[in-house]
Structures are given as structure tokens and as C-alpha cells.
RNA sequence: GGGAGCUUAGCUCAGCUGGUUCAGAGCACCUGCCUUACAAGCAGGGGGUCAUAGGUUCGAACCCUAUAGCUCCCACCA
């Protein structure tokens, strides 16, 4: 049968993925095996696969596939996140395109659109993950806003409220003027900007021409000023005590206050105070009992309280007011300064500090076990450097603003009566019951539910629990859980990006301890960020992100997986380049061709096994076990890049370049000789082992070849094959073989230097005091040596080299240039003499001999002896020339 | 402003508690081969004062100190 010259991956990928899925190999239900569990970081339901997902999910799949082969009950739970603010923003934009304004819709109407959209476009990303080969248990697919999971979110809200960990209060929050909602501190991206610092003078009340000059980057907020603040020890302003200044344009008098908060060095040392629009001013306002004037509408336009510019956008007003101030003679000067401006992570709008009534989780108490159990390594962060970052954050954790002025999400279970009193309850009926205790005259129509929803992360922090048992949270003290959660929780590994260490990882840990009394996972593998060749973050706006599906089409899923993993140590950024995938694809091709070779062998069970094949088999068996031990070790350390590279070399160098070359039958008269049965069987066994070790990285080609190299019974597939166990092996044999490898390399080197054609054979002459001919067959076949002669005297006119204390010569009919040979030998001699000198110096050093370990001294002595004999041989050779 | 980490070959990175598995790997590069598994390949080769300057030590890429550059996290002086 003719075997295709290249692996037709596209068809194979589809075929094998369906096969795995249909056979139920990804399905997991509790049994008596040890579980191995990963919950996917749920991608945004409206998301499409990008390179970050590729990396992240490739890693998870490698881990899951290997665990499955190790005989564990592997369970990878997939799902999507409703991503309230991002999705809502998307739906709003879409409706706008259709000419529908969110403001004109009721909550129910809007949600209907949103759900429709979600049903139609949501979850595309999960289908895309299948193309990558992700071995998720698709029957367990979850969505954070499905009914059960939403209920668990509400249960948690109520529970935390009852425990006193949730409170409602007026605080300065980060306001997204575009999405019209509060966002948490973590959702604000600070960016450095060059801003203008305006020096404005305020007239002192009751004077004709006395002024106080302040400096501000936000002149429009002077309309909300309620004080000017100076440092109590600032002599320049001491005389102002008890006086007032006049707010320009408005002619409103405000008081002068003294506080050490002010930096005397900055600007003029006088600060205007706008408690409604600045975090620090708010604190000052509270301390000094200042009035607070909110001059902005939620959308960032000026409110009636501003009195001027009402309805105009804050940035337009900034320009306008500067002009007006200048005309009125209040603008003293303008400077440029660098400062930081906060932007909304989701809408990129400039964040406005805004005073508003929101719900908060008090973090101090509930986050304690989460810090403790990372510090004591009950939960391991990989790489470890993130522990410090984590610690720093947890020790300074702020209360978490969890209410969002959005509709897409879990609605806050708080109910209000007409006076604004509230109760927290699961349903309107329950809330009504609670109200009735206070106010018997109240009717159910008089109460209404909070309009806001909770932060998305307030739902996804429950993910590792709720995917298995959403009822846990409402179950009460006596609830024993279901078989799934008791079996799968805590999960094993979490693979995610460091960017969401606080957003998500820390909070899952908090929720885990709060609700299960146990960690949600043992290992957190933090991946790097995928960047482009120039080191820029991949982003839509830069257009520098390749479409992962295109890459898969071009390079195969296996190729892309290998490409992603080749260069991605944990926590390090991945400078991505297509050529990495190309390397992966080449590797695939190499494996395919090894298969073509082996499959093309003509088997003859009547012929005896050649000596070289015996050696090859013994050697590869040892080499494989040595490498497998190494690969296993790298896996346990989560060094996947290195594990892949070790596998790569095992396959390419050891199996293909050495083993197959050794056992490959010769060509005689343009025809390959047959191979003996024994060697062939061993080769198939080796091939099978290699496919297994490759499988987590390259699932498709390995599954294909696993079935092609041998007959398989029903249910026997690479995906569920048993991971090879490390057998004992002889390191001595590996060492001895290494000697043969050195000889081969040296002969090849000479052949290359002398331009000996590959098909031309050479002779090899050995002068050795302890000749060992056991690897002659290897040397002959791999170095193109016709015969190996053992002699006592060096032959004349031959190119030589040394391996250990043995001298080797390749007699060549021509081309031996005595001058070149002399130069080569001299160079070698000089090096060895220098080397000997350094060793002797070391050994002559009393302190070294006294302090170093005995083995080390022994080693140095051996080095000395080796070098001495080598020098002697070289000198003889030189003399003979 | 506070904290963490990094700097080793052209690129991306390994180098565990100081001592030939200490100067390594893959890719890239150079040379020669279209040798019937693979030119997406084979064989060979050249590349590094281990950021800089001191120190500790018999011995430093590795430990200490300082300097420079880069990255990230936290805070947010208007």
C-alpha cells in the first residue's frame, strides 16, 4: 500500500476528534480512580478564540491528556462566562446599529434581545476549542448565567449579607461614563498621560486685588469646589486664616482649610477641593465637614448643579472654561505635567470618581484563609514569583464594589419600600414577609427590587464549585453535597493569565474557603502574555493578532500546539511568530516520515537479527527510559516547554537520527533488504511508546499513527493508552554508546573536511591500549566506514583524532596536508597543555585539596591523567609528521 | 512613591544547595550533500568578558554591595 507523502491533517483532525468524542473518551463520571480535574477559565460567551486562549487551552489540554493516560479519571469542565459589562456593551452597540436605543427599552425587552443574541452567537468559542483538540467533557458545559448558577450567586449574596460581609454604602467609586456603571478598582487601567496643569487665581473675599492661586488638571471641576486647602505650616498662606475665596465665574465664596495632606511643593501649595469628584478631596471633605456638589451627570455631562455649561460634556467644558477663565483674568499660567489617568477596562472611557450608593463586599475577614493557604503553599502558584505579588495585594485588599448599573447579570436580591428601606431576600414574597414585620400596611406592589446586577466576578468566583454543585451555597449547614462535588473538588490545576490573579484567582480561593472550607485547586499555572515579534501585546486594534483558526488550517492543530508551547515557560511572555508553528509542522512531518520508513519495511522472519540492531535496541530502550524519567520530572514541575523539547529531541535525534538509522536495512542493487522480525517488532513497540509520550502535545498525528502502525482492538486508542512507565536501564551502556557516538561524529567531521562523498566509504584505524570492538558495527554503518583495523603503530599519511586515550586514523588516498595536520595537532596540544596546567594548579593548591569534596579531587586527578596521556599521544604524532 | 523580578550566542530561553553534565538547548546563520522515510531533510561548523564595577572564596554565570537598563504589580500629588 502506498502511504501518502505527507500527513493529511485536516481530515484526520476532524475524524479523530469525532472519534474521541463519540467514544466518550472525554467523558468523566465519578468512580474509584483518582480524579484529575481542571475547570476552564470560562471565556466570554461572546468571545472568539484569540492567541491567549490558544496558549491557555493548549496547556490545559496537555495536562489533561497526560493525566488521562496516567490512568486518572480526567475531567476538564468547559463553559462560558456571561461577562456582564462586556456583553452588555456589545449588545447595546448592536442595538444602536439597528437604530434601537437602550434607553427606550425596558429591562425585560433588553434582556430578551441579549439572550437572543447570546443564543445565536454565544459559545462559538467552545466550538473553536474543539479544533484545537481540547479534550473537555462537553456534557458538563456550563454557563455562568444559567439558572442554577445564577441562583447560587444570589444565595451567596444573601449569605454574605447575613454574615455581615456585604454592606451598602455611599462611597467614591470608579464610574464608567460610557457604560453608566460603577466598576471595581481592578477594572480601571491607569495610563500615563501628558496633561495640562492650569494655575488659576481665586480672589480673596473682601479684597480688591488679593488672590490665591491654585493648580489643577481639571479646571471644569471648580464649579464643584467647596474649599481651598493649604498646608498648616505653609507661611505663604498663614495670613489667610478665617478668610474665604471666591470661586471664579460662579462668584461663590468658599472657605480656606488647613490640612497636612497638601504637598507644599506641588503647584502653588494651594489645592482646590471638590469632594464630589476626587477621592482625596472626598476624604478631606469628610474630615472638614465640607459640602459636596455633584456637578456631573452619570454620562459625564455637566449637571444642573454645575450651574454653567449644563448638559455639555466634561472634556468640551474643560476647553471652554479655560477660555472663559482666561478672559475673566483668572488664568495665571499653564504647565505640562505627566500624570496618570484611569480608563475603563471594558469601554476605555476615562473613569470618573463619583460618589454613589453601591454594594460592597468587606474583604478583610473573608480573605484571611486565602492569603494563608498560598503562603503556606497549600496552593502553589507557578511560577513562584507571583506569591509576592499575591501577598502584597491580599494584605492591602480593598473592599470590593460589587454592584453594577447594568441589566445583563444576576440582579441584586435587595428590595426597597417607598421610603428607601431595604431588605435582602431571595424573592419578592420573602422580601415582602420581612417588610411586613415592620410595616403591616405595606402592599407587595409597593416594594421593588434593586435595579443593579452584581459584578461578573461575583459569579465567576464560585465557578470551581458551582460547575459541580450549584446547590452548595443554598444548601444550609446540613447539606452534604452531591457525588460530583465530593469527588472532583478540590480541583487539581488552574491555568490562567496573571492579569486576572486578583480579579478571579484570589477571589475563587476566598470563595473556596468560605463555602467549601477547602481550596478550589492545588496548582495555579500562570501563563505569559502572547506578544507579537516586536514584543507588542496582541490586540484587535493593532491588528497584529493572527486568527488561530487560520493557523490551524495552515500548520495543523498539532503544529500550532507545538509552536505555542515551544517558547512558553510559565509566567514568561511568549513572543509569538508563525515560524514557531512551522517548526511544529516540520516536527509533525518528521514523525510522519519515520512512520513511512517503518511501515515500508519488508519483514522476513527467516533472517537473523544483525548485531547492530541488537545494539540499537538495547541502546534505545535505555535512552528512552532515561529521557522518559526526565520528561516526567519536567511535567511535575510544570516545565512544559522543556518537557516538549526533551520529547522533541528524543523523537528527532534519538529515535530517528540514531535508532532508525542503525536498524534501517541496507540497499542492495537499488532495493532495500528485508528486516528481521525481531527488530521490526521492537521498532513498533518503540514507536508506540514514542507516540504515547508525544500524544499530550500532538494528539492528532499520534492517534492516527497509533492506529496505523498496528492492529487495534475496539477501545484501544492513543488518547486512553497507558503512559509508559520508567523501566530500569543501564547508564553504563549509555555511556559506552556515547563513546561510539563520539567516534562516529569525528569520522563524519573528517569526511566533511575532506569532502568525502556520502556514498564513498573510508577506512578507520585504531591504536588503543585496550581495544574494544563491540561498537564497530555502529561505527561502520553510521560513519560510512568499510572496516575498522586495530594496529599498534600509527599509520603514515592519515588524518587522526582522539577519543579518550584512543587514537583513531582515517587513511585517505589523497588530500592529507602535513602542514594542516601539524597546525591542527599543535592547536590541540596547546589547549590540552593549558588545561593540564589549570588542573595541576588546582591540585597543587593546599586549600583546594583541604576543602573540596573527595570525589571532586578524584575527578581532578583523573582529568590530569587523561590530559597527560593525550598530550603524550599528540606529541608523538607531531614528532612523526 | 512602595514592592517584585529580569539582564547568559543574532533570537527565545535552560543553567537545582558555588567545583567538566559550566558556559548549554532550540531556532537562525555558514559549509557540503537532491545518500530512494523526510531538502519541511541529512552531515558538519562558527557564534557568548554570563549587563557593568567592586567584594567574599582555594574556586563565582551562581553568594554580597553598588551602578545602569528593562519588565510587572500596587498606590495615584491636585
Image (spheres, coloured by chain):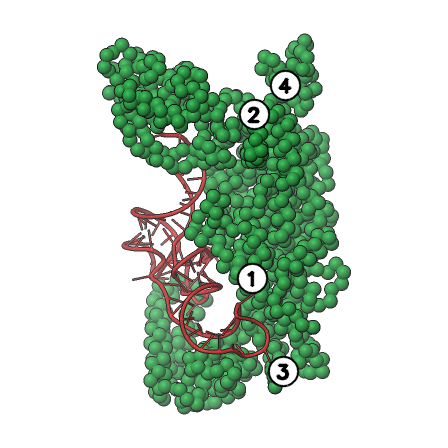
Q: Mark 3 to mark 4: distance in Å?
A: 88 Å
Q: Where, quadrant-wise, is the N terminus of chain A in this rendering?
A: bottom right
Mark 1 crowdedness (10 Å alpha carbons): few <14, some 14-19, many ≥20: many
Label annotation for residue A103: 2
Mark 4 crowdedness (10 Å alpha carbons): few <14, some 14-19, many ≥20: some
Q: Where, quadrant-wise, is the C terminus of chain A in this rendering?
A: bottom left
Residue receiving disc 3: A671
Q: Which one is in front in this view, the residue at disc 4 or the one at disc 2?
A: 2
Q: Mark 1 to mark 2: distance in Å?
A: 52 Å
Q: Chain of mark 2?
A: A
SS assignment at label 4: strand
For the residues labelled 4 and 2, say whether their Cβ atoms are less than 8 Å apart. no
Q: Earlier in the sequence, mark 3 or mark 4?
A: 4
- Among the chains, which one is green? A
Q: Is residue A230 visible?
A: yes
Q: Mark 1 to mark 4: distance in Å?
A: 60 Å
Residue A24 pos. (x, y %): 73, 52
Q: Mark 3 to mark 2: distance in Å?
A: 81 Å
Tint of chain B: red
Q: Is residue A206 above or below residue A808?
A: above
In front: A50, or A436? A50
Residue A214 pos. (x, y %): 30, 23
Q: Is residue A610 above or below residue A164?
A: below
Amino acid at each position: 500500500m502506498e502511504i501518502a507523502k505527507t500527513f493529511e491533517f485536516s481530515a484526520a483532525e476532524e475524524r479523530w476528534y469525532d472519534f474521541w468524542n463519540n467514544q466518550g473518551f472525554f467523558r468523566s463520571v465519578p468512580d474509584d480512580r483518582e480524579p484529575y480535574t481542571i475547570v476552564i477559565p470560562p471565556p466570554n460567551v461572546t468571545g472568539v478564540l484569540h492567541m491567549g486562549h490558544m496558549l491557555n487551552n493548549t496547556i490545559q489540554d496537555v495536562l489533561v491528556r497526560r493525566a488521562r493516560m496516567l490512568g486518572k479519571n480526567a475531567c476538564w469542565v468547559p463553559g462560558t462566562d456571561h461577562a456582564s459589562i462586556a456583553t452588555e456593551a456589545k449588545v447595546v452597540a448592536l442595538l444602536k446599529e439597528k437604530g434601537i436605543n437602550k434607553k427606550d427599552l425596558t429591562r425585560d425587552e433588553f434582556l430578551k434581545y441579549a439572550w437572543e443574541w447570546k443564543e445565536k452567537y454565544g459559545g462559538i468559542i467552545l466550538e473553536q476549542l474543539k479544533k484545537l483538540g481540547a479534550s473537555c467533557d462537553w456534557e458538563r458545559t456550563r454557563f455562568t448565567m444559567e439558572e442554577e448558577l445564577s441562583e447560587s450567586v444570589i444565595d451567596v449574596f444573601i449569605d454574605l449579607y447575613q454574615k455581615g460581609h456585604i454592606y451598602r454604602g455611599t462611597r467614591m467609586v470608579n464610574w464608567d461614563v460610557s457604560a453608566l456603571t460603577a466598576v471595581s478598582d481592578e477594572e480601571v487601567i491607569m495610563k500615563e498621560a501628558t496633561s495640562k496643569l492650569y494655575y488659576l487665581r481665586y480672589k480673596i473675599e473682601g479684597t480688591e486685588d488679593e488672590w490665591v492661586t491654585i493648580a489643577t488638571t481639571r479646571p471644569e471641576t471648580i464649579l464643584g469646589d467647596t474649599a481651598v486647602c493649604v498646608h498648616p505650616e505653609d507661611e505663604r498662606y498663614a495670613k489667610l486664616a478665617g478668610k474665604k475665596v471666591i470661586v471664579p465665574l460662579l462668584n461663590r465664596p468658599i472657605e480656606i482649610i488647613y490640612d497636612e495632606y497638601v504637598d507644599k511643593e506641588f503647584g502653588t501649595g494651594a489645592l482646590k477641593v471638590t469632594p464630589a469628584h476626587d477621592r482625596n478631596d472626598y476624604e478631606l471633605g469628610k474630615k472638614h465637614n465640607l459640602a459636596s456638589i455633584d456637578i456631573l451627570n452619570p454620562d459625564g455631562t455637566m449637571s444642573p448643579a454645575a450651574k454653567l455649561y449644563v448638559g455639555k460634556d466634561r472634556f468640551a467644558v474643560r476647553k471652554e472654561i479655560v477660555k472663559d477663565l482666561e478672559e475673566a483674568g483668572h488664568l495665571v499660567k499653564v504647565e505640562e505635567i505627566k500624570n496618570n489617568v484611569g480608563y475603563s477596562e471594558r469601554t476605555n472611557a476615562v473613569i470618573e470618581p463619583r460618589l454613589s450608593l453601591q454594594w460592597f463586599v468587606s474583604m478583610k475577614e473573608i480573605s484571611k484563609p486565602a492569603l494563608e493557604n498560598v503562603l503556606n503553599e497549600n496552593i502553589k502558584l507557578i511560577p513562584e514569583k507571583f506569591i509576592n505579588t499575591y501577598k502584597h495585594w491580599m494584605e492591602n485588599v480593598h473592599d470590593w464594589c460589587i454592584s453594577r448599573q447594568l441589566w445583563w447579570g444576576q440582579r441584586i436580591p435587595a428590595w426597597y419600600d417607598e421610603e428607601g428601606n431595604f431588605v435582602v431576600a431571595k424573592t419578592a414574597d420573602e422580601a415582602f414577609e420581612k417588610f411586613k414585620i415592620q410595616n403591616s400596611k405595606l402592599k407587595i406592589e409597593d416594594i421593588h427590587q434593586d435595579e443593579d446586577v452584581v459584578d461578573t466576578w461575583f459569579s465567576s468566583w464560585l465557578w470551581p464549585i458551582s460547575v459541580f454543585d450549584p446547590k452548595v451555597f443554598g444548601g444550609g449547614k446540613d447539606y452534604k453535597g452531591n457525588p460530583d462535588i465530593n469527588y472532583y473538588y478540590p480541583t487539581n490545576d488552574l491555568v490562567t493569565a496573571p492579569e486576572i490573579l486578583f480579579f478571579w484567582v484570589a477571589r475563587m480561593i476566598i470563595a473556596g474557603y468560605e463555602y467549601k472550607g477547602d481550596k478550589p485547586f492545588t496548582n495555579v499555572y500562570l501563563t505569559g502574555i502572547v506578544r507579537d515579534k516586536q514584543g507588542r501585546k496582541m490586540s484587535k486594534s493593532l491588528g497584529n493578532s493572527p486568527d488561530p483558526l487560520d493557523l490551524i488550517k495552515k500548520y495543523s492543530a498539532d503544529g500550532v500546539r507545538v509552536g505555542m508551547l515551544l517558547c512558553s515557560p510559565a509566567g514568561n511572555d511568549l513572543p509569538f511568530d508563525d515560524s514557531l508553528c512551522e517548526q511544529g509542522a516540520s516536527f509533525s512531518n518528521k514523525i510522519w516520515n519515520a512512520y513511512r520508513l517503518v511501515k515500508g519495511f519488508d519483514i522476513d522472519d527467516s533472517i537473523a537479527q544483525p548485531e547492530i540492531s541488537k545494539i540499537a535496541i538495547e541502546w534505545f530502550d535505555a535512552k528512552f527510559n532515561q529521557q522518559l524519567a526526565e520528561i516526567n520530572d519536567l511535567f511535575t514541575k510544570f516545565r512544559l516547554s522543556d518537557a516538549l523539547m526533551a520529547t522533541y529531541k528524543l523523537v528527532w535525534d534519538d529515535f530517528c537520527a540514531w535508532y532508525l538509522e542503525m536498524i534501517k536495512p541496507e540497499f542492495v542493487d537499488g532495493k532495500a533488504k528485508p528486516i528481521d522480525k525481531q527488530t521490526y517488532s521492537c521498532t513498533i513497540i518503540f514507536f508506540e511508546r514514542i507516540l504515547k509520550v508525544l500524544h499530550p502535545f500532538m494528539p492528532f498525528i499520534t492517534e492516527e499513527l497509533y492506529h496505523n502502525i498496528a492492529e487495534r482492538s475496539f477501545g484501544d486508542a492513543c488518547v486512553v493508552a497507558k503512559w509508559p512507565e520508567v523501566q530500569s536501564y543501564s547508564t553504563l551502556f549509555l555511556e559506552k554508546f556515547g563513546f561510539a557516538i563520539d567516534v562516529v561524529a569525528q569520522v563524519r567531521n573528517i569526511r566533511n573536511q575532506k569532502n568525502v562523498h556520502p556514498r564513498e566509504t573510508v577506512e578507520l584505524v585504531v591504536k588503543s591500549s585496550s581495544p574494544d570492538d563491540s561498537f564497530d558495527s555502529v561505527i561502520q554503518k553510521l560513519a560510512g566506514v568499510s572496516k575498522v583495523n586495530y594496529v599498534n603503530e600509527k599509520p603514515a599519511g592519515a588524518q587522526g583524532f582522539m577519543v579518550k586515550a584512543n587514537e583513531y586514523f582515517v587513511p585517505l588516498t589523497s588530500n592529507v596536508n602535513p602542514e594542516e595536520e601539524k597546525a591542527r595537532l599543535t592547536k590541540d596540544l596547546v589547549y590540552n597543555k593549558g588545561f593540564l596546567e589549570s588542573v595541576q594548579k588546582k591540585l597543587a593548591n593546599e586549600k583546594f585539596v583541604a576543602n573540596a569534596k573527595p570525589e571532586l579531587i578524584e575527578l581532578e586527578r583523573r582529568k590530569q591523567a587523561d590530559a597527560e596521556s593525550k598530550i603524550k599521544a599528540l606529541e608523538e604524532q607531531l614528532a612523526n609528521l
